[in-house]
Image (cartoon, rainbow, N blue to C red):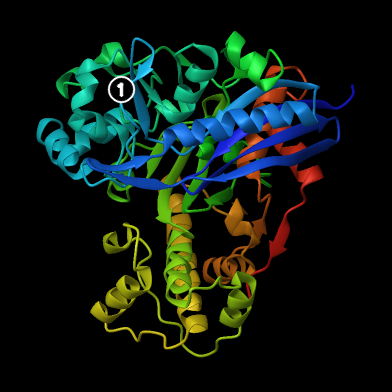
Amino acid sequence: MGVRAVAAVDLGATSGRVVIGRIGVDSLELELVSRFPNGPVEREDGLHWDFDALYDHIVDGLAEAVRREPAIESIGIDSWAVDYGLLRDGELLAEPFHYRDARTERGVAEVHEVVPFAEMYARNGLQFLPFNTLYQYRVDELLADADTALLIPDLIAYLLTGASVAERTNASTTGLLGVRSGEWDAELADRLSIRTAALPALVDPGSVIGMLRPELAAQIGKDLPVIAVGSHDTASAVVAVPLSSPNAAYISCGTWGLVGVELTEPVLTDAARGANFTHELGVDGRYRFLHNVTGLWLLSETIRAWEEDDGATIDLPGLLDAASAVTGDIALFDANDVSLSAPGDMSTRIAAVLRANSSPVPDSRAAFTRTIVESIAAAFTTAVQTAADLSGREIDSIHLVGGGSLNRLLCQATADRSGLPVLAGPVEATALGNVLVQARALGAAPATLEELRALVARTHAPIRYAPR
């Protein structure tokens, strides 16, 4: 069997890209075709995504991918979770809102007045995050006018193919999917006055959503199917975590750190609810039993502010090397402190959190960076230990994938604080998982998750950080 090729659209909260994936019996390679910025834009009515620009970048990237690799056989799309677009008669009613928009606070209050969180957790198994889709739907006045609500990857697939579906792993982040049934919880939606008619039919990763619409096939240069992947980026990332044992934990680390274990049965206990652990669906019906920890967002926002102050770009590898050399006591803060969730002026807010806990504020940028990274590592360690306690697993290693796996200081700090080996990589876990699920649907990759992960381990050997 020769090498086969697919195109993966991988959208994060700060940037997106289109990649070509090439897969063979013992080969798995990615070629970056295009990378483009993505982020919140302030409009009169709040924080949105610049969706038109995003969509244009995607179509241009797919056309370039086909130009470079005419053998591409399919397209798969993954993105961040929870956000959506509303359609009426096939037209977008408004620019999709950004999950950090303040309107969600009202949604939380209204939803919990109708359905207490304890009951909600028993139904959907989701950790409390103030931006989960059901809180957004509750306060979105346009939902009443919409005939279809589509999460971001499903919305893009619809624009490409004309077929409206809800891919199940991402649908599980809405709060409207039954944790045991994996089907829409119509009763919950009805109680919250969320129109179930707008929720499309559910499909599993590996399903063909549809063929490109003729005008797009002409623009992209080939008539291709769009295949559902683990369209929540973390679902795709976890496919490509080369788990060394069933007792390995994983951290998918970028803007957020998603910390957890993979389970085949949910843990719907009071303790799990109290610890705010979630049950997002993974590929092949697995549960991603995990907790959201604020990740490299804290560092990137801090550096962004410093760069604005300096009027110059900061050398991140140099800054991290300097941070590694810092000696003495390292001040720590709670990486999940709610005051650190909004954009802007991050170093000032971190300093305020440190002062509020009578901790010293580091006086150099290197020491401040060290405090941020060690605080993220401490939060990761706590979440790994909690995952172990709640699931009854004896954790023996931590796999850290995504952009955070390039941060040697973070990997070593996580190993040191947890006392467990950290296996770092692949960096591109999300795109690899997207590619693998497409390839498997095409008959070009092994059938089981374990075999897919073995292929990742053979082709992208992780870097091991032993605890010191």
Q: Residue at x 64, y 23 (%)?
A: 75
Where residue 290 appears, as percent x and y from the top left, is: 44, 45
Q: To which quarter of the image does residue 144 belong?
A: top left
| Residue 426 visible in the snapshot | yes
Q: Residue at x 37, y 73 (%)?
A: 347
Q: Is residue 157 found left or right of 383 in the rendered image? A: right
Q: Quarter of the image containing the N terminus?
A: top right
Up the image or down, 285 lies above or below 339; here it is: above
Q: Residue at x 45, y 79 (%)?
A: 368
Up the image or down, 464 lies above or below 18; here it is: below
Where residue 57 appears, as percent x and y from the top left, is: 56, 35
Q: Residue at x 16, y 34 (%)?
A: 111
Task: Find disc 1 in the rendering and name its residue.
Answer: 93
Where residue 362 appears, as percent x and y from the top left, is: 41, 85
Q: Which residue is nearer to you in this view: 79 or 278?
A: 79
Q: Is residue 262 found left or right of 359 in the rendered image? A: right
